[in-house]
Amino acid sequence: MSGLTRDEMAKRLAHDIPNGAYVNLGIGIPELVAKFVPADREFIYHTENGLLGMGPAPKEGEGDPELINAGKRQVTALPGAAYFHHADSFSMIRGGHLDLSVLGALQVSSGGDLANWSTGGPDAIPAVGGAMDLVAGVKSVYVITQHCTKNGEPKLVEACTYPLTGVGVVNRIYTDLAVIEVTSDGFQLVELSPEISFEYVQERTGAPLLPKQENAS
Amino acid sequence: MSGLTRDEMAKRLAHDIPNGAYVNLGIGIPELVAKFVPADREFIYHTENGLLGMGPAPKEGEGDPELINAGKRQVTALPGAAYFHHADSFSMIRGGHLDLSVLGALQVSSGGDLANWSTGGPDAIPAVGGAMDLVAGVKSVYVITQHCTKNGEPKLVEACTYPLTGVGVVNRIYTDLAVIEVTSDGFQLVELSPEISFEYVQERTGAPLLPKQENAS
Amino acid sequence: MLHKQIASTKEAVADVFDGATVMIGGFGEAGSPIELIHALIDHGATNLTVINNNTGSGEVGLAALIKAHRVSKMICSYPRTANSTVFPKLYHDNEIELELVPQGTLAERIRAGGSGIPAFYTPTSVGTPLGEGKEVREIKGRNYVLEYGLTADFSLIKARKADTHGNLLYNKTARNFSPLMAMAGKTTVAQVQHIVQAGELDPETIITPGIFVQRVIEVDEPLLESALVAAGETYP
Amino acid sequence: MLHKQIASTKEAVADVFDGATVMIGGFGEAGSPIELIHALIDHGATNLTVINNNTGSGEVGLAALIKAHRVSKMICSYPRTANSTVFPKLYHDNEIELELVPQGTLAERIRAGGSGIPAFYTPTSVGTPLGEGKEVREIKGRNYVLEYGLTADFSLIKARKADTHGNLLYNKTARNFSPLMAMAGKTTVAQVQHIVQAGELDPETIITPGIFVQRVIEVDEPLLESALVAAGETYP
């Protein structure tokens, strides 16, 4: 039982984004989502450093070091794009104008708390970027992450031990093992990855996992 | 003893504006100031409805009803002009970026309080526009007004009886009779209009008027 | 695949409900979306709270909406302008409520509402009747009043040009409150003179990014309020 | 008759004083006014508080300023980027202070400072370590933290084009914080690739109106931070 690859996780998440959505993709696995726009849908990608209508990386030699994404990698601007300054960009975020924020995670609690910016270690240089603004303002927050750490520790927990990014902000979690909704009752299974059992996921989850609702789509 | 005409008052005020100043002119007598830019100086006029670099009224038939000033009269845009929205416009005002606001007055107190937006009468429709923002934010506030009302009542008073626009905000007052500075000691004469005596001005002023300082320029 | 273009002004305002808060762009006639306002009159929604810098002039556009008794409350900075007779009459007759807000505070409250900022402090109105009853706070030795963000169920605005993504360009000082209202409206409807394909506008020059605009409707030759007023026109 | 054009980067930063607060535009290298920063290093002002989204990379530009021990405090959102080694070392050695601010709060605090708004409430950071010690207020059932505006003695920014009135246009995502910093700086210095005469820029497209800019200096072929870092360059 190996679960989904990172690309498969990204594709699964992209499947749940409605047509016309305005989406901000965090750095790392979230960036992969842009590779999997379902047929007949168009998503508008926002990057918090001042661009709506972000496109893929430029061809070799055609990039502009002043056209970058939040991860400071070169990107392109699609037809219909707009540039703006940082205050306007975060007005979009904080003001609830973006439909979806896709973020990575260190930990997610069953109450939807997210920890994704610092391990809190004494030697760590704290760096938060725009993550706290995204979770505070965007209509939906989807986390995409490996179900467990490299050491096999669960990332989905009762309560986060790392410093929080936001309280009660995560709506859904897409992992290699499952899609899980954060409900008022805690983690609820939406879908298991192929060949993955409920028990297998529960064993690797640090809080109770509610079974899939029979009537849920 | 007739004192200055409105045009002469405006010209006198314009004489005190430094080169390169960013200036907002209120509606009425303040608008006349734009006619009297001293030689070798350039003022940049701001109108709070979204234009820096405002020029004079357009020639007959050449105006655009969507290029207007705060008084809703057609104007022009000079070379170097910029358009912006209302929040940016009032960031300029509130943020202390404008050098001078020239306003009319119903009353000015010896402490620099200004009343210029409402007589407070029960039948009056209250209307404030941008006056409260201008006096709260602009570096210097000059009032240009007739020294007395049409009924001969003083407009320069101990304490305003009309609703205030701002508290302790007026720096200088230009009237038909005199130029008066508002100091921590109250009204101080800067200059008498030709053929006008100190006593004549004091009689028409509702608070003590300090004589001109000998060393003042 | 973005479907922001609406076929008619009627359709563009069809879901405005009784009791809605509606921001209407414009400073006087400059930027006033007169065709959308007339469609709103035809539509019939009533008990509206309207946010605009003024209260209209003559008996067309915003003044006609007020005259039709559709507006229970106005939030504005300057309800008294040339040829403004409709609002003063209803105000004196206690048939319409007025919340008077300094112009810069009005602009900032709208921007705050659209930016997820629920409240802010400002020096404007401190010590005046418009600051009365408001929380005052001293910060670094100066007093400020607390003001709250404004949002709207609908924002009706006018622009010069849109693309199919809803990106907007304005005309001169007709820009005024509209980019802010676009941010603060849950549903923002823009009437524009021209709609072009996405990609035809320079992304460096966009004033309102399309994310703030839900509907665009082409009105290629918009009526001019001052011309209608001068001609003694009324609406409907 | 406006004299905003300065002849040299040296002259442009000549009055930056010890202990000054300096905002520096840019998001990573995009929009970083590297020539102005190098002039500031040459100038020698020290004990600076610097506001920038990051802390520079390699040993040029902002990182070089930090390495030269001219910065006593950084206010930023993300002090940890690729090739960023100078800041971490000084931070671990307790030789530089860090005020970590969420990126959107940082942007809004700078805009507020430039707009005469001394403080505002925001939902960002509520319940997190970065909200600790801050005043929390419930507004309409949700909690917000109080944040204060930021201003600077000097803002050093980079733009694509200026006119002689100081109106600025930017390049793509190099715009980022610079229009806000221009508003918040008591003295704003813009290095630009081209200066044109007033009237040559379309007034509809100006991003930073000239009132926010006190000095412009032409640097027609600015250095590229990433290229310098890749080449192992250091400054001075």
Image (tube, coloured by chain):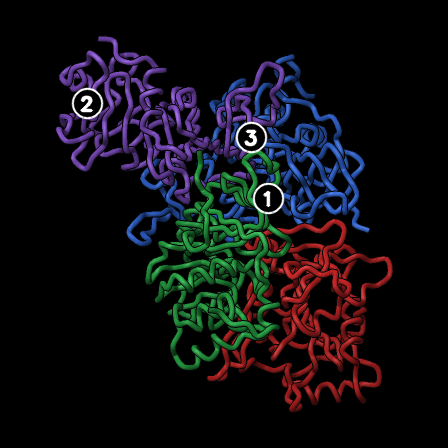
Chain colours: A purple, B red, C green, D blue
- Asked if residue D49 is positioned above or below residue C215 in the image, the reply reads above
Which mark lies nearer to you, 1 or 2? 2
Instruction: Tell me the subunit letter for badge 2.
Output: A
Q: Secondary structure at mark 1?
A: strand
Using the rendered image, report if marks 3 and 1 lie on a common chain.
yes
Image depth: mark 3 or mark 1 in front: 3
Q: Is residue D92 visible?
A: yes
Cα separation, mark 3 vs mark 2, equals 38 Å
State the residue position of label 1. Answer: D152
Residue A191 in percent (x, y) is at 21, 22
Name the quadrant of the C terminus of chain B. Answer: bottom right
Indicate which disc residue D27 carries: 3
Chain ID at mark 1: D
Residue tagged 2 = A206
Q: Chain of mark 3?
A: D
Q: Can you say which quadrant of the picture contains the N terminus of chain B?
A: bottom right
Tag 1–tag 2 contact (CB < 8 Å):
no
The single residue placed furthest to the right in the displayed view is B39
Quick check: C116 above or below C232?
A: above
Q: Report the Cα–Cα distance between label 1 and label 2.
A: 47 Å
* Amino acid bearing label 3: Phe
- The location of residue B102, given as percent across then percent down, is 68, 67
The lab-note entry on whether marks 1 and 2 share a chain reads no
